[in-house]
Amino acid sequence: MTAQAKKLNSADKKALPPHIYDTFIVGAGISGIATAIRLDQVGYTNYKIIEKATRVGGTWRENTYPGCGCDVPSALYSYSFAPSAKWSHLFARQPEILSYLEEVSEKFNVSSKIEFGTELINAAWNKERNLWVIDTNKGQFLSKTVIFATGPITEAQIPKLEGLETFKGEMFHSAKWNHDYDLTGKRIAVIGTGASAIQFVPQIQPLAKELYVYQRTAPWVVPKPDTDLGEVSKALIEKFPFIQKAWRKTVAQSLNAINFGLRNPTVLKPVGELAKLILRFQIEDAELR
C-alpha cells in the first residue's frame, strides 16, 4: 500500500467510480466500528468500511488461542455508549468480546456499511481532484478522507529463526492457533512470553508431556484480579447502570495512574517489589525465578 500522489490520465478519469465518499474506513475491528458509529452520531453518513475478513472483530476475530481474553476490565474495554451487562467475568474472554462487537455493529447499523472480503491494495492521493483513490480486490473507490483502523496486532509475526524451514514438527503462531492439532502428550516449545503466552501457556501446560518456554526479556506479571460476575451481579448491573459507570471511571483513573508511572519509573518501584514478592511465593526454586 502506498499513499503518494497519483496523477490520472484521461482513461483513468473515465474509469473512476462516480460516487465519492466523505469518509472511507479501512478495518472493521473495535476502532473501525467506533469510528463509523461516531460518524453516524454527528450526521456524516456518507462513508464506507472495507474489511478483508468475512466478519467484524479485528484482533478478537483473529486470536482464538486457549485462554484468550482481555487484560483490561470489561467495563472499560467496551464502548461508553454501549455498556453491557452480559460480561461473565470482570475480564472478558475472547468469544464474549467478539460477540459484543458483532452485536454493537448490528445495533448501530454499521454492518450495512461494511464491504466484507475486501482487501486494500493501494491508497493514493490525487492532487487534481483532491481525493483519495482507493484500490481494492473488489474494485476502486473515491473518498475525501481515509481512516486506517487496521490495528497493529492482527497480523501474526513469525520470527526469522534458523531451522524453521526444515522443522518437521507441527508449528503455528498463537494468533493462528491450530485447534485441530492435539497437544496432549507432546513436547512443546513456546517462543516468547508476551501477553498471549501469559494467557495460553497455563492452559496448555497440563496437556504437555514436556513444555519449554523461551524468552528474551522477562515481562512483569502480577495475578489478574479476575472473578466470575454471576447472574446476580449481571442483573444488578443491568438494573442499575450507574454501578458499571462508576466502576468504569475508577478503572480508567487507575490505568491513567499506571501510565503516569510508565513515564516516571520510580513511582512503580513498589509495584515491582510486589511482583517479586509474588514470584518468590509462587516459585520456590530461586534459579527458575
Image (cartoon, rainbow, N blue to C red):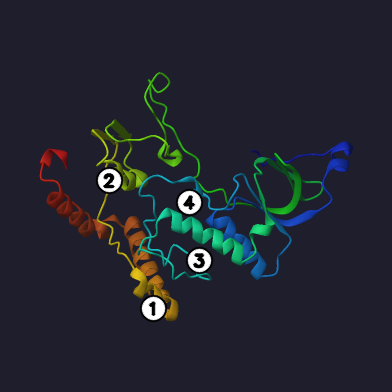
User: How far across and how far down the image is residue 29, in percent?
Assistant: 55, 53
Single out the mark in the foreground, 3 or 4: 4
Badge 1: residue crowd in 10 Å (few <14, some 14–19, many ≥20): few
Query: Mark 2–mark 3 contact, CB under 8 Å?
Result: no
Q: Quick one: quadrant of the C terminus?
A: top left
Q: Is residue 284 above or below residue 178?
A: below
SS at mark 1 in the image: helix
Give the residue at mark 4. Answer: 60
Q: Is residue 132 above or below residue 41?
A: above
Give the residue at mark 2. Answer: 202
Single out the mark in the foreground, 4 or 1: 1
| Camera sees residue 264 | yes
- Distance between the Cα atoms at labels 1 and 2? 32 Å
- Distance between the Cα atoms at labels 4 and 1? 27 Å
SS at mark 2 in the image: helix
Question: Which sits earlier in the primary sequence, circle 1 or circle 3?
Answer: 3
Q: Is residue 45 above or below residue 152?
A: below
Give the residue at mark 3. Answer: 79
User: How far across and how far down the image is residue 98, in percent?
Assistant: 49, 55
Q: At label 4, which amino acid type do we have?
A: Trp
Q: Seen in the image, is 127 located left or right of residue 195?
A: right
Q: At label 3, which amino acid type do we have?
A: Tyr
Task: Name which quarter of the figure residue 162 lies in.
Answer: top left
Question: Which sits earlier in the primary sequence, circle 4 or circle 1?
Answer: 4
Give the residue at mark 1. Answer: 236
- Distance between the Cα atoms at labels 1 and 3? 19 Å
Q: Seen in the image, is 248 located left or right of residue 39?
A: left
Q: Residue furthest top?
A: 166
Task: Name which quarter of the figure residue 168 lies in.
Answer: top left
- Distance between the Cα atoms at labels 3 and 4? 15 Å
Q: Quick one: quadrant of the N terminus?
A: top right
